[in-house]
Image (tube, rainbow, N blue to C red):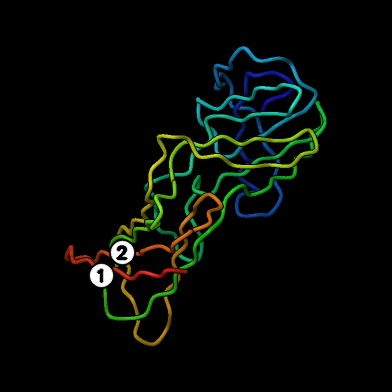
């Protein structure tokens, strides 16, 4: 959480709120971002998940949050996505304690049938779309948000299953991959790697 300046303080949710849609948080003593040299601003801005490279800068055009990450290697979680895989941002007036988090990315939902035991699923765009890695969030003074992937961002993202997930021929198994909001100009390819290391690829132009 950045409270009007470019040094962020880390917080952790109280155990009694884990898995709920609202939460209360406590300070993690001694865990902060280093901050930068930007100007003071009149908002409280919060970013999930924490990492020590997060920073907020401000000018007359709005706010820039740097150090946001979309993980390139994500872990399979049944019925959802893994902790820290789905970045969120909240902003409110300086000093306010109620924060409403908004997802800044999207999720690709993949439903698979068959007899494979899935070890990994990899998503790759056909027009070199940047799908994981470092990102910036540009926030207008009106609260609007836009994600810009960095130049060194990866052009793929993978979901790892440990242990491998056995598919069913009758009931779909659902996998979720967190990505930045992306327009796939020429479609994308999904590559499924099974527990034996064999790969099966499926592509779409849409």
Q: Secondary structure at mark 1?
A: strand
* 165 left or right of 135 in image: left
Residue found at x 50% / y 25%: 52
Q: How many C-alpha atoms fall within 10 Å of the one at disc 2: few (<14), some, or many (≥20)? A: some
Location of residue 157 with respect to 25 vertically, above or below: below
Mark 2–mark 1 contact, CB under 8 Å?
A: yes
Q: Which residue is mark 1?
A: 200
Q: Secondary structure at mark 2?
A: strand
* 62 left or right of 85 in image: right
Residue found at x 37% / y 56%: 124
Location of residue 69 with respect to 21 vertically, above or below: above
Sequence-earlier tag: 2 or 1:
2
The N terminus, quarter of image: top right
Nearer to us in this view, 174 or 78: 174
**Farthest top residue?**
37
* 139 left or right of 130 in image: right
Quarter assignment of residue 119? bottom left
Q: Which residue is mark 2?
A: 191
Q: Position of residue 186 (x, y in %)?
A: 44, 62
Q: Position of residue 154 (x, y in %)?
A: 38, 43
Report, in whole angstroms, how far the alpha carbon at label 2 lies from the one at label 1.
Answer: 6 Å
């Amino acid at each position: 959480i950045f409270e009007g300046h470019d040094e962020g303080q880390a917080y952790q949710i109280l155990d009694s709120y884990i898995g709920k849609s609202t939460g209360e948080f406590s300070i993690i003593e001694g865990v902060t971002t280093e901050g930068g040299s930007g100007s003071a601003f009149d908002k409280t801005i919060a970013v999930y998940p924490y990492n020590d490279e997060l920073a907020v800068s401000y000018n007359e055009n709005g706010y820039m949050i740097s150090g946001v990450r979309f993980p390139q290697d994500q872990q399979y979680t049944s019925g959802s996505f893994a902790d820290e895989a789905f970045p969120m941002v909240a902003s409110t007036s300086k000093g306010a304690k109620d924060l409403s988090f908004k997802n800044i990315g999207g999720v690709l939902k993949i439903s698979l049938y068959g007899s494979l035991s899935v070890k990994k699923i990899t998503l790759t765009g056909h027009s070199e779309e940047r799908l994981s890695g470092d990102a910036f969030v540009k926030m207008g003074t009106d609260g609007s948000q836009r994600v810009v992937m960095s130049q060194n961002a990866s052009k793929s993202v993978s979901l790892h299953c440990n242990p491998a997930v056995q598919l069913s021929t009758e009931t779909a198994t659902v996998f979720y991959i967190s990505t930045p909001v992306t327009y796939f100009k020429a479609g994308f390819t999904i590559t499924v790697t099974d527990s034996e290391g064999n790969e099966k690829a499926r592509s779409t132009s849409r």
